[in-house]
Image (tube, rainbow, N blue to C red):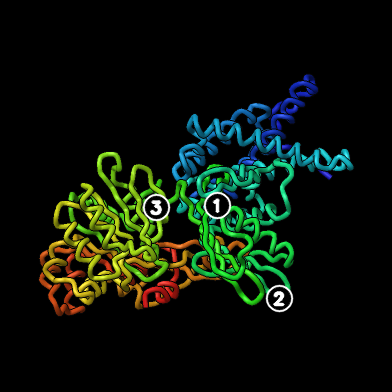
Amino acid sequence: MTEVSIPFPFAEVDYPSYSVFPVAGLAALAGFASLAAVGGVASTWIRQTTDDLELDDAEWLAIGFPLTAGGSVAAVLFLGPIAIPVFAALLLIELFLFFKKRDAVVAEQRQFLRKGGLRALKSEIQTVIRRTRAGNDENPAEPGSRSLTGRFSEFRERLQKSLARPPKSTSAAGARKRRGNDPHRDEQAPPADSQGFIFLKKDGAVAVDASPGSSGLSDNIHNTKRILQKAMELLATDVHFEPHDDGYAARLRVDGVLMDADSISTGEGKGVAQAIKVMSDMNIAERRRPQDGTFSIQAGTDKYDVRVASSPTSYGEKLVLRLLKTSGGILSTGLDGIGVRKRVLEQLRAIIHKPYGMFLVAGPTGSGKTTTVYAALSEIDAKQHNITTIEDPVEYRLDNITQIAVNTKADVSFASILRSVLRQDPDVLLVGEIRDRETAEIACQAALTGHFVFSTLHANDSVATITRLLDLGLDPTLLQTAVTAVLGQRLARRLCKACKEPCEPPPGLTKKFNLDEGAVKHIYREKGCSACGGTGYKGRIGLHELLIVTDEIREQMTAQPSVNALKAAAIKNGTVLLQLDGFLKVLQGHTSVSEILRVTT
Ligand SMILES: [Zn+2]
């Protein structure tokens, strides 16, 4: 056996320097170990963050860290302790590059390369430390049951989760996006539980303060809070609380579809129903006649108005609660929050800031018409304009705006209120819905006499809106001169970001956009996972077609209009029809072909 000669440069390096071993050698080892630990934690975090934020192009960064860590082992062996600062610098550069990528897509207060973001990060880390400690204190019966490494990995896990969580946003669209982006939502979610939770009466007085830490709350309040919290978390629009032969069931309407959420015993259910009726000022002794009432909830910084309707069923009283988020949401994001394409957004803004005219939003029930109209209205300066709304019922509350509710029982109709409001020098009017000829006529006249009128109409699309108004008996010349634009609208379900799977686009799709075969490599279809309850969809996205009334369109608005001629004129003027707008959103990966076909045909 010959002696193996050690090749250059290994032989040339005086590492470890045994003469000073305890100091330099230990320092080198410690330096290397901490470098490897930082590299490991950072690479896991980066991988998770790239997943959550869907940063495809940052993949190399995620594999960069293990490579760096491996490289540093080699370097320490070859170069000695000097390798540590070199590779620490490399790590920092990689982290810096990644932060830059991440900062480009997250909210300002979470950008690490900014002051506000660093402050938020610091408090985030403090929260995690506090929670980890609290978590350990919860188990005083088993002191020391968790090893140091166990604690460290738990701490790391919590920190990663809270850092990876996509940006906090106050908007409904943001919340939806957050849900879609975040597959870990369910495990880490309820910061909701650590926030205040106060039930308010109609007049704003506190009914029950059910914030964490409040004492003496009844089971009824706990159950009510649990059901409503779940509804808020899932962005439900309605809660159905209904008695069956073996108990009460709570079902939630999420993205337009009902889903089971909770079930409790008959006794508990009656308690919840009673608590809700008390809070909404309903007569608790009356169970045989339908009633309605309202209350509000202040949950953390979010505020909800809840409209309650009761009806007797064979098993007892059923309650349906409609949740309306009055804070943040569409009113704070304006038209940016409704998902229109950029070009349409620019056109919409130009239209709604005109001094007079009429803007109509059309679609079937549940297509988001009201939300769009409010989003548009919220962009108008309420201090400089006298804005009045006439609604049935008042859905969103706006500051500095006069809101009037229609009361058909008292014979207070859209038309009669509109007439009186016009005598109060309004600039901008919102007429909740045009249902009859009288309302349509007064609204058109208002639009012609220096007011801007917003309204909605139950019609399939923008062209159908024109024929519908003519069918109501509206004079074509009035229509021609008063209407500025019509927005046709639909809501399609958004594909769940956690599970959508790529598929080949059908050949007809690329042809529709005059694209070359193979120009679009793949689109997505629904699959289903635990994050979306197996449906493959989560949240919704609006489809829009904007018909601007130009001279060419006006010519077609005759007493007997041809739908095809109107459509052709609209397309010639640049209107992208609903279905096509939907397919554009398919190409962008937001939704699927089958969903667009479901909502547009
Ligand atoms: Zn899914």
In the image, which is nearer the foreground, mark 2 or mark 3?
A: 2
**Which label is found at residue 245?**
2
N-term-proximal mark, 1 vs 3: 1
The answer to whether residue 63 is seen in the rendering is no
The C terminus lies in quadrant:
bottom left
Q: Secondary structure at mark 1?
A: helix
Residue 126, above or below 192: above
Q: Secondary structure at mark 3?
A: helix
Q: Can you tell which quarter of the image residue 485 is in? A: bottom left
Q: Is residue 520 left or right of residue 493?
A: left
Image coordinates of residue 191 in percent, x first then y, are 63, 45
Residue 450, above or below 123: below
Nearer to me, 435 or 255: 435
Image coordinates of residue 23 in percent, x first then y, are 77, 21
Nearer to me, 20 or 65: 65
Could you tell me the amino acid type at mark 3? Gly
Could you tell me the amino acid type at mark 1? Asp
Residue bearing mark 1: 52
Q: Can you tell which quarter of the image residue 105 is in? A: top left
- Distance from disc 2 to disc 3, alpha carbons, whole Å, reads 43 Å
- Distance from disc 1 to disc 3, alpha carbons, whole Å, reads 21 Å
Q: Is residue 585 left or right of residue 121?
A: left
The answer to whether residue 581 is seen in the rendering is yes
Could you tell me the amino acid type at mark 2? Asp
- Distance from disc 2 to disc 1, alpha carbons, whole Å, reads 44 Å
In the image, which is nearer the foreground, mark 2 or mark 1?
A: 2
N-term-proximal mark, 2 vs 3: 2
Image coordinates of residue 60 in percent, x first then y, are 53, 49
The N terminus lies in quadrant:
top right
**Which label is found at residue 337?**
3
